[in-house]
Structures are given as structure tokens and as C-alpha cells.
Amino acid sequence: MAKVALTRILPDAGMALLKEAEAAGEIELDIWPGDLPPDREALVALLHGCDGAIVLVTDPIGAELLDAEPQIRVLSQFAVGYDNIDLTAATARGVAVCNTPGVLTETTADLAWALLMASARRVVEGADYVRAGKWQTWGPTLLMGADVHHATLGIVGFGRIGKEVAKRGRGFDMRILAFDTMPDEQAAADLGIELVDLETLLRESDFVSLHCALTAETRHLIDADALALMKPTAILINAARGPVVDTDALVNALQTGAIAGAGLDVTDPEPIPADHPLVGLQNVVIVPHIASASIATRGKMAEMAAQNLLAVLRGERPAHIVNPEVLS
């Protein structure tokens, strides 16, 4: 019987598959019960003796941990991104790393648009204004924001999610620019999108939406120099990973008016403390990494994560594996 760790309780669709496998005697589950992620010591203890685990972006898995638990065969990530896992170390040790791509693409694009609209039209500021009892009358200059229709949208990372964000932009009659190190020219042509270099995108966009993976090359891709290229009226949206943006540089840009605002699903650090300078700025909308948090999507993600894990443990090929070379 394979021992399996879960670093958090999953939505019902995934738990049902795992409980069924446990009832059939295939696996033995060890589930971290807390709402907060296990700390380093607790994570090491949880994974001790395990053949596989379903892990989250909050669970750092490196070479040292994998060397301590050489029996681990599969790490099934409950996310698309897997930057919390040392993929090189896992692959070298024959550990399959799986993820949940595709299923959260449109849901994440929806949330990016929610942040864009909320930031452009100052929705959160407006709601706070009402709650604070400040709404006394209609005024011609009250909470004026930026138009979205016919504006220029720049998409950094023209993958699955970036393409869906672009599709939504077409409905607002936007001019859409995209930057990607491996651009999909056919998709760009089909969607009527201009592929440009990053500098051009930053200079010309009214909204810059980030949808690239976190790598060594994209860490602090949006730094002080990048922010200085943007229009003072521009708004930055980040639904990728927090470290793609240099947080200190972003705070300075927002405080000095180098850019007009930001809408963030992810931050660096994450979670961001309530007393962080970024949180106190009125021209920032921050939500707690909820881009995929629709009921349907999180259920599908849980199901996929469970299916990936069980497939590897059963000696089958999982539907979504990041390093398929380990299967050979």
C-alpha cells in the first residue's frame, strides 16, 4: 500500500477519488489538517515515508528533502505553476512532477479582468467610500477613473491565460500588444494582436497584464527600469507570480505617480502583511491569490491532482506531467 501525503484538505471532487482509493486498499492517506501550510519541520515530518504527495505552491520541495525521502515517486501539484518544486532535483531523482494546466485558464483570465476593471474604475475605493459614510451627493469629479474600452492592453506572457485575457480585450475594442520569448504568431494573427518587444509594450500600454511563469529570467522582470518606461496613467495587473515584480520598485512607482495603479492577485512576499506599504496605498487592489478560486475550477483542479498522483502510483502515465522523461 502506497503512503500518500496531502499538505492541505482538497475540494470534495479530489478527496472523493483519494478516499475511494484508500477504501480499496491502494493508498494510505496522511492529511495536514490546518488551514495554514505546514512549516518546514512539519512538512518534512508529513512527507516522511511517503510514496507520493499532493502539494501546493506554499510547499517548498528541494533536493535536501527529496534526498531524505528517496522513496517518493510523485509530487502532484495543485496548481499550474510549480516554482515551489526544484524540478531539476526531482527529475534527477526520478520523481514525477505533475500539475493542473488548462482547467484554470479561463477562470484566471476572468480574475485578471476583474482586477483590471476594479483598478481602472476605482471600484474598491468606491465601495470603501460608501462604507465609510462619505457619500453625500453625486459629484462631477468624484472617483474618476480610466476608460478600458479602446485603450491599449499589453500582455506579458502570451500562453494559455494570456490568450484568454486577449480574447476578453477584443470585446472592449482594445488595441492589444503581447510579448513572449516564444511567441505564438498564428494565435496572434488570429486574434489581431501585435507581437512586440517588452520595451515597446511597456511604453505604449494603458494596462500591462502579467501572465508569465516565474523563472530565473522573469524574476523582477518588472523592476524600477521597467516601471519607468510605463505611462504615468498606466495600471499594472499581476495574476502570475509575485516575484515577477520588484515590490519595492512598485511601491515607489505608485507613491511617486510613475504609474497610476495596480491590481494584484499575487505579491512578494506572499501573503503580504497588512502593515506593508503596498497594502496601505489607495491606488492598489490586492486580493489573496484567488485567480483560480471558482467552485467549479477548484473542484476540477483537485480531481486532476488526485488523478495524476494515482496514475503514477498505479504505474500509468498521468494526464499532466511536467517531466515525462522520468517515466522511462
Image (tube, grey):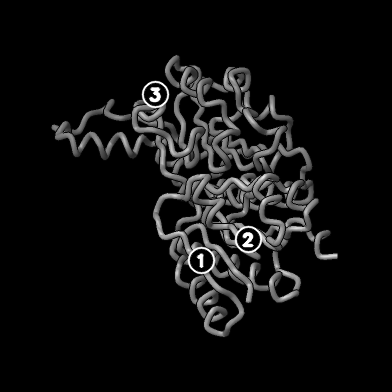
Q: Position of residue 6 (x, y in %)?
A: 52, 62
Q: Position of residue 109 (x, y in %)?
A: 54, 51
Amino acid type, label 1: Asp
Q: Quadrant of residue 120?
A: top left
Label 1: how many Cα within 10 Å (few below 14, some 14–19, many 20+): some
Q: Position of residue 176 (x, y in %)?
A: 63, 39
Tell me what residue is drawn at x 60 percent, y 68 percent.
304
Front of the two marks 2 and 3: 2
| SS label for mark 2 | strand
Residue that badge 1 annotates: 30
Residue that badge 3 annotates: 277
Instruction: Kindly identify which numbered label has been placed on residue 76.
Output: 2
Front of the two marks 1 and 3: 1
Tell me what residue is drawn at x 57 percent, y 22 percent.
227
The answer to the question of whether label 1 and label 3 lie on touching residues, with beta carbons closer than 8 A, is no
Comparing 281 with 80, the one in front is: 80
Amino acid type, label 2: Ser
| Mark closest to the chain's N terminus, 2 or 1 | 1
The answer to the question of whether label 2 and label 1 lie on touching residues, with beta carbons closer than 8 A, is no
3D distance between C-alphas at marks 1 and 3? 39 Å
| Mark closest to the chain's N terminus, 1 or 3 | 1
Query: Residue reaching furthest top?
Result: 256
Label 3: how many Cα within 10 Å (few below 14, some 14–19, many 20+): some
Residue 311 visible (yes or no): yes
Query: Residue reaching furthest bottom?
Result: 24
Residue 100 visible (yes or no): no
